[in-house]
Image (tube, grey):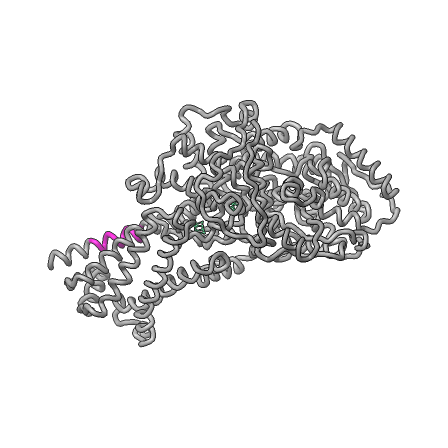
Amino acid sequence: MAVKEFEKPTLKDYTSIPSVEKDATSHLAPFKSKEEFQSSLGYPGELVDNWQEIALDKMGDLLKKYRSLRVYLDSCMQCGACTDKCHYYLGTKDPNNMPVGRQNLMRGVYRRYFTLPGKYLPKLVGAVDFTKEVLDEWYSYYHQCSQCRRCAVFCPIGIDTAEISMAAREIMDSVGVGQKYCNEIIGKVHKIGNNLGLPEPALANTLEGLEEDVKDEINIDVKFPLDVKDSDVLLITPSADFFAEPHVDGLIGYAKVFHQAGISWTLSSHASEAANFGMFIGSYDNMRKLALRIREAALELNVKRIIFGECGHAWRVAYSFLNTLAGPFDFLDSRYPVPQHICELTYDLMNRNVLKFDKSANDDMTLTYHDSCNVARASNMGDILGGQFSVPRDIIKATVNNFYDMEEESIKEKTYCCGGGGGLLTDDLIELRMKGALPRMEALKRVVDDHGVTHMAAICAICKSQFSKAFQYYGFELDQIISLHQLVGNALIMNKKEL
Amino acid sequence: MSFVTIFYVILFYLAAIILFVGLGYRIYEYAIIPAPLKIPTPPAPKTIQGVAARLIREVVFFESLFSATKWTWLFGWLFHFALLLAAFRHLRYFTDPVWGWVSWEIVQAAGHYGGYVMVFGLFGLLSRRIFVDRVRYISSPSDYLMLILIIGIAVSGLMMKWFQTDIVAVKQFFLGLMYFKWAELPTDLVLLVHLSLVALLMIIFPYSKLLHAPGLFFSPTRNQTDTSRDQRHISDWAKKIESQK
Ligand code: SF4
Ligand code: SF4
C-alpha cells in the first residue's frame, strides 16, 4: 500500500498549540501482524470471534496486575493540563492524540464495564460500549503514541499515558490484533538474537570489516570482539549500530574507548540486540524473555560487567527493568552498577584522565544535543540527580568546542520525542512520524538560526534513524544527526597501546 | 422529630458510610495492586524521604501542574486552598468544645472569604472547560456537573450570610449525628440545599474522578524511588512466573 500524500507542516519560529481538528489522523494505523508472527509470540493469529469477552477479561487481569493502569484510569480529573504536551497532538492536531484524549479511549471502556456509574449512566461519564469501531480506534491511536512519557511529567497526578498505551497493545495482541513491525522484530530476536535477524557469521563478518576500516583510517588495531569468553565487559548494543549510519560511528567510538582504556570487552551473538520491543507491546512475558538472553550471554561468556550502547528505550529497560526481569546479577563484579551505560563508562574514564581529548578534531561542527525520551524520563546515569542530562552533555563539552542547548521547554525532562519511538519507526506510519517530529524540528531550527548549530548528537538508535528521515523531510541534511560516541571517537587521543 | 430531620439523619449516615467505606475500599484496592516495574519520572528521588518531599510539593503547591499550565494551576490551586480554609471554618460544627485555633477570628474570617475564592477558582475552571477547545473536547457532562455541584455548595454556603439560620441548632444536629443523640435540624431552605449537595458530593466521591485525591499517593510515577539498579524490585505475580520456568 502506497503511503498517501499528506500536507507538510511548516516550521514556525515558535512552537504553537494548534486548534483541535477532529479525526485529523484517524486514517493512520500501522500494518497488522500476520499469523506466523502472532503465534510465535503466543498470540492468536487474527481477531478472534469472542474478542470482546477476551479483551475485557485481559483488561480485568491487567487492572489487577498493574497499579499504574488502575489508578490512572480512575484518577484523571480531565483537567486538560496534558492536552498540549504531546508532540503528536502538536504535529497532527488530532484531539485523540492529546494524552488525555488517548487515555479516554480506554477509559470509556473501563468505565462502561468496570465502574458503577459507567454501567448505569454511561452517557453522563463518557462510558462507551467496546465495539469493533472502538477497537479500531484503539488500534489507530494507541499506535500513535511513542510512549515517551512527556505527558506524565506535566500531569498533576503523574498519569503516564505510556502505561495505558502498553496495556492497550497487550489487550489487542491477546485478541489477535498485533502490530506487524513490533511483533516481527520480537520474533526475530527470540529466534536469532537481534532485531535485524542477523546470524552469527554475518555479524562476525561485519565486525571484521569494521576492524579493517578503523585500521585503514587511524592505523591502530582496534578490536571488535565477538563471543570472547572471560572478557571484562559484555557490550549490549542496538543492532543498528552494526550497520546503519550514523549509528556505526558510535560503535567505533565505543571500541576506541575500550581500546584506549585497556578494558577487554566482547559482543555476544546470543544477545546481539539491546532493543527490547517487548516493552512497546506492553508484554511483561516477551520483555522478560528478551532480557533473559542478556543474562544467559553474561553467564556464558563469564564477564564481569554489562554495558549498554546508545539506545534510548533499551537503556530504559536496562536501567529500570533489567534487574527486575532478569536479576539478580550477583555473579557480576559488584563494584559496578548493573548494567552501566557506555556514557557512564566514558564519563568515568574521562574524569579519571584515562581518556584525553583533542576537541579541535570536532571543530568543523557546532553541536546541540537531543535528550532521547526514554533516557531523559525513565533512567539515570552516574547515580547523580539529573545525571541522565548532565553526563552526556559533559562528555560532549569535553569533546567539542562549540555546543549550544536547545530551549529549556524542549530538553531534559521536557524533551520532545523524535517522533519515531515506541515501536512506530516503520514506513507505514511515515505521516505520523514526520508530523510528530515537528516540535523537535522547530526547536532545532531555532538553534540553527541563532547559533549556527550544524549537528545534533543523540544516544538512541531510533532517534538517529528517525532524524535521518525527518531532517531530509524538513530541509536539513541527513548527516546532521550523529552519535555521541562519534564525537568521542573523533576527539579521543589514541596511542598505539595494544590489548 | 420532624420528617425533614429524619430524612437528613438517614441521608448523612448513608453518605458517610458510602464515603468512608467506599474510599477505604478504593485505597485498599490501590494498596494491594502491585506496581511490577519501576517507572518514576524525573527528578526521581533516591530515598523514601525524597518521595515524601516530592508528594508534599505536589499536594501543597501542585508542582507539576504549575509547570504545565499557569491558568489551570491558578484556578485549581486557589480552589483547593480555599476549600481547605472553608473546611477549617466548618470544624466548629463538629467539635465541642471548639478547638482553640478553630475559633480564632482569623480562621473564621479566612474560611468565610475562602468561600468567595472558591467560587472564583471554580468559575475559572469552568470557563476553561467552556472556552479552551482542547479542554472542551475532553469534557463529559459529569465534568461540568461536578464543577456546578461544588459551585452550588460554595454559593449556598455563602448565602447563609444573608439567610441566617440557627447555627447552634445545626451544630447540635451534627454533634447528635456523631454521638447518636439526634437533634432537630432547622428547615431553612438554603441550609437544606447546602447540606443535600454536600451529601451528594460525599456519595459520588468514591465513584468519580475525585479519586484523584488518593490516586496521587498511589501514582507509581510519583511515589517510587529511583533505586532499580541497587535493589531488585519484583512483584509477587512476576516471582510466580520465574518459579514456573
Ligand atoms: S493532566 Fe493528568 S489529570 Fe489532567 S487531563 Fe491530563 S491525564 Fe488527566
Ligand atoms: S506518552 Fe508521549 S506520545 Fe504518548 S501520549 Fe504521552 S506525550 Fe504523547
Q: Residue at x 28, y 40 (%)?
A: A120
Q: Quadrant of the N terminus of chain A?
A: top right
How far across and how far down the image is residue B109, in percent? Answer: 31, 73
How far across and how far down the image is residue A41, in percent? Answer: 55, 28
Name the main secondary structure of what is drawn in magenta. Answer: helix
Q: Is residue B16 magenta?
A: yes
Front-most of residues B106 and B78: B78
Q: Residue at x 36, y 62 (%)?
A: B121
Front-most of residues A30 and A26: A26
Give the quarter of the image for residue A403: bottom right
**Quick check: B169 above or below A18?**
below
Front-most of residues A153 and A340: A153
How far across and how far down the image is residue B244, in percent? Answer: 54, 32
* Residue A158 in sight here: yes
Front-most of residues A5 and A412: A5
**Quick check: B228 above or below A3?**
below
Horizontal side of residue B163 vs A266, given as left or right: left
Horizontal side of residue A309 vs A415, given as left or right: right
Q: Residue at x 35, y 35 (%)?
A: A129
Horizontal side of residue B145 vs A82, given as left or right: left
Which residue is at the far left? B2
Q: Residue at x 83, y 37 (%)?
A: A213
Q: Is residue B179 magenta?
A: no
- Figure label count: 0
Which residue is at the far bottom? B105
Query: Which stretch is magenta?
Result: B11-21
Give the quarter of the image for residue B234: top right
* Residue A328 in sight here: no
How far across and how far down the image is residue A172, in percent? Answer: 47, 32
Q: Quadrant of the C terminus of chain A?
A: top right
